[in-house]
């Protein structure tokens, strides 16, 4: 990246104290994010979602987040107080959670929730907030925004719920959006529509995007760069277009385990994991 990164993370670690010992969810990772689409991929439990939450300091106790550096646009996220973090969350960095429809307040209309997200970060009246919310609903390609504005979350479909949540996260006009598997519960057609919306909005606004997913093919086609995580570590970092030329055995194993149309009737390869991947001294992964 030619420009200075929006977010710079060094030696990020996330630990959880349990009755049987400490669980290392993230084990000392390094990465930067600019005004680009950065994908984070890996199996369930690899530390993808925890990494996204740690950036916004949304890891609750007994979780512990430590880092040598976690700098966002000149702000030290490690030492920012609660008041500063409330200003950053939503306004500067937004996060779309997994199954975002179920993150909506069930007793408020979706339009009111979007308008409220705008008013929290901008000093405007109710009329202006409603106008901006309707514009945002149109931006995420919802037909008849006036009608949808007055619906409750249970009255919208899964795909529409995803779009509403994206609208709510984008209306404060953040610099960085963290999208945690925002399309995992959608069918392929709706999934591609939501990705097209994200792509269009990121390009128009010059935002940065961290796209968390377990779908290698999806990330390869949508993102600019990819971080491959396993066991809380980054195994490899490479350009999305070069994913098929990955060198780390973990990434190669994930790619080989993907089903193809011509593989019907044949067993898929089973990934062999090497314990050394969790201890080798490459916290930033193989850089390409």
Image (cartoon, rainbow, N blue to C red):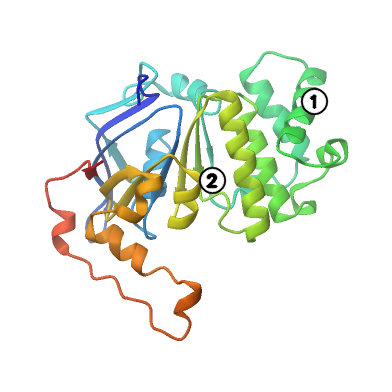
Quadrant of the frame with the C terminus: top left
Q: Position of residue 169 (x, y in %)?
A: 60, 34
Q: Which mark is residue 130?
A: 1
Quadrant of the frame with the N terminus: top left
Residue at the image point whose x is 53% and y is 51% from the top? 98
Q: Position of residue 147 (x, y in %)?
A: 88, 40
Residue at the image point whose x is 29% and y is 65% from the top? 253
Whether tag 1 and tag 2 are in contact, CB under 8 A, the answer is no
Q: Quadrant of residue 115?
A: top right
Q: Quadrant of residue 4?
A: top left
Residue at the image point whose x is 47% and y is 20% from the top? 83
Marks 1 and 2 sit apart, C-alpha to C-alpha, by 24 Å
Q: Position of residue 174 (x, y in %)?
A: 55, 25
- Above or below, 257 against 131 in this view is below
- Looking at the image, tell me whether mark 1 or mark 2 is earlier in sequence order: 2
* Element on which disc 2 rests: loop
- Above or below, 254 against 281 in this view is below
Residue at the image point whose x is 47% and y is 77% from the top? 262
Pointer 1 local density, CA inside 10 Å: few below 14, some 14–19, many at least 20: many
Image-based side of 268 in relation to 252, left or right: right
In front of the other: 241 or 14: 241
Can residue 118 be seen here? The reply is yes
Q: Which residue is mark 2?
A: 97
């Amino acid at each position: 990246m030619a420009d200075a990164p929006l977010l710079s993370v060094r030696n990020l670690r996330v630990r959880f104290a349990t009755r049987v010992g400490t669980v290392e969810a993230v084990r000392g990772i390094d990465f930067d994010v600019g005004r680009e689409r950065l994908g984070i991929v890996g199996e369930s439990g690899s530390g993808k979602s925890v990494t996204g939450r740690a950036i916004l300091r949304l890891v609750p106790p007994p979780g512990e987040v430590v880092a040598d550096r976690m700098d966002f646009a000149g702000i030290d996220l490690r030492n920012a107080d609660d008041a500063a973090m409330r200003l950053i969350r939503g306004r500067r960095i937004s996060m779309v959670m997994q199954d975002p429809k179920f993150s909506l307040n069930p007793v408020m209309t979706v339009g009111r929730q979007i308008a409220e997200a705008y008013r929290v970060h901008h000093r405007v009246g109710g009329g202006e907030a409603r106008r901006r919310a309707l514009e945002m609903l149109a931006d995420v390609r919802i037909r008849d925004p006036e009608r949808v504005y007055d619906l409750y979350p249970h009255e919208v479909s899964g795909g529409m719920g995803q779009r509403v949540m994206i609208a709510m996260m984008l209306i404060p006009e953040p610099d960085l959006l963290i999208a945690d598997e925002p399309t995992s519960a959608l069918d392929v057609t709706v999934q591609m529509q939501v990705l097209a919306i994200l792509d269009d909005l990121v390009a128009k606004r010059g935002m940065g995007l961290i796209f968390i997913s377990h779908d290698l093919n999806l990330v390869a086609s949508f993102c600019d760069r990819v971080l491959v995580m396993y066991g809380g570590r980054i195994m490899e970092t490479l350009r999305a277009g070069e994913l098929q030329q990955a060198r780390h055995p973990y990434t190669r194993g994930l790619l080989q385990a993907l089903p193809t149309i011509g593989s019907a009737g044949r067993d898929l390869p089973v990934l062999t994991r090497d314990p050394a991947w969790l201890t080798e001294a490459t916290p930033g992964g193989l850089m390409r």
